[in-house]
Amino acid sequence: MNFQQLRYVRETVRRKLNLTEAAAALHTSQPGVSKQIRELENELGFDIFVRRGKRMFAITEPGRAVLGIIERLLQEAENLKRAAQDFSDQDAGGLTIATTHTQARYALPRVVGEFKRRYPRVHLTLQQGNPPQLAEMVRAGAADIAIATEALDHFPGLLALPAYTWSHCAVVPPRHALLKAGALTLETLAKHPIVTYDAAFAGRTHIDAAFAARGLAAVVVLSAIDADVIKTYVELGLGVGIIAAMAFDAKRDLKLRAIDCAHLFHSNVTRVAIKRGNLLRGYAYEFIELFAPALNRKLIERALAGEGALYEL
């Protein structure tokens, strides 16, 4: 039994039993993956996968029983490497942050700049996607930390901690009728075509829920994952934009005006997620604390250990 065999089993499961994809991800051949898995099964004394000819199409009951053990063994092997790296060279290595466009564009630049000033020898990578994709990146070990507003606290195996709260605002051209309508209401807003986020991003669920609770049918004429795209189409007169308030900059967005929507939609919580059981490098904890000062290393380690209650925003 060796770690290579365990990695082959894990990757095969992650690739939904597609040996061709597993082999490509592992940079080896399909017959090599199949052979190594078969040798492991022979040593264990049972099949991990159900086969039809050369094709795998299911996981056996004993196979399911050992998958968790395989995952823990591989995770602890990675933890051992990280611990060694942390003691041998604390200021060098890699850190991958999986995040949304909104966070990467508006919330993270200050953090990234300060982090690179402190750790110039750490190779920092930003991966973007929707929140479920970000969660899967962390669960699969493709990213160390996920940062997003939606969905991160719904994934087993992840610890999602609240970082900060934010609200939405409406954006319109300078002479738009809403600027003269007094305090903005959902009823008034629903009379206009809406340009806002895709359903998986940036608090869109709170927007939809607010209109639905009042029995209003808001007409969303365009949805996007990017606040800059939303603002572009608002400038073209497509409709009223609803974006994260942090995404509006009066100095840059000269062709738009912002209207506060904090009273119309529930506030949103951006969370930081890490994989349970995963050992983070020291500088990873520092990155998290730069992003959310309340999330210090001691609090995160206590949360991972299941000790005490977390603070709420």
Image (cartoon, rainbow, N blue to C red):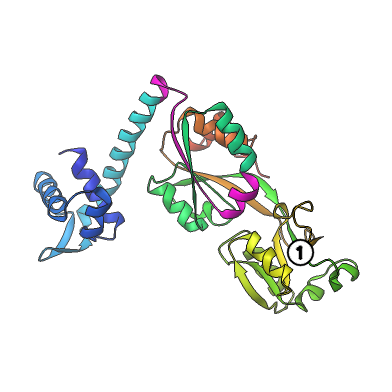
Q: Nearer the viewer, residue 244 or 275?
A: 244
Q: Residue at x 66, y 70 (%)?
A: 208
Indicate the quadrant where residue 174 lies.
bottom right
- The amino acid type, in three-letter code, at marker 1 is Val
Residue 221 is a magenta residue: no
The answer to whether residue 254 is left or right of residue 311 is right
- In depth, the one of 209 and 289 nearer the eye is 289
Q: Position of residue 242 (x, y in %)?
A: 71, 65
How many other residues sit within 10 Å of disc 1, few (<14), some (14-19) or many (≥20)? many
Q: Quadrant of the C terminus?
A: top right
Residue 140 is left or right of residue 214, and the answer is left
- Per the rendered image, the range of residues in magenta is 86-108
Vertical placement of 193 versus 311: above or below? below
How many numbered tags mark residues here?
1
Residue at 62 percent of width and 42 percent of height: 109
Q: Is residue 255 left or right of residue 282?
A: right
- Residue 43 in sight from this viewpoint: yes
Q: Quadrant of residue 203?
A: bottom right
* Element assignment for label 1: strand
Residue 97 forms part of the magenta stretch: yes
Q: Residue at x 33, y 39 (%)?
A: 75
Q: Residue at x 45, y 33 (%)?
A: 280
Residue 202 point in image, percent of width and height: 62, 58
Q: Position of residue 36 (x, y in %)?
A: 13, 47
Q: Which residue is mark 1?
A: 171
| Residue 308 can be seen in this image | no
239 is higher (above) or lower (below) than 230: below
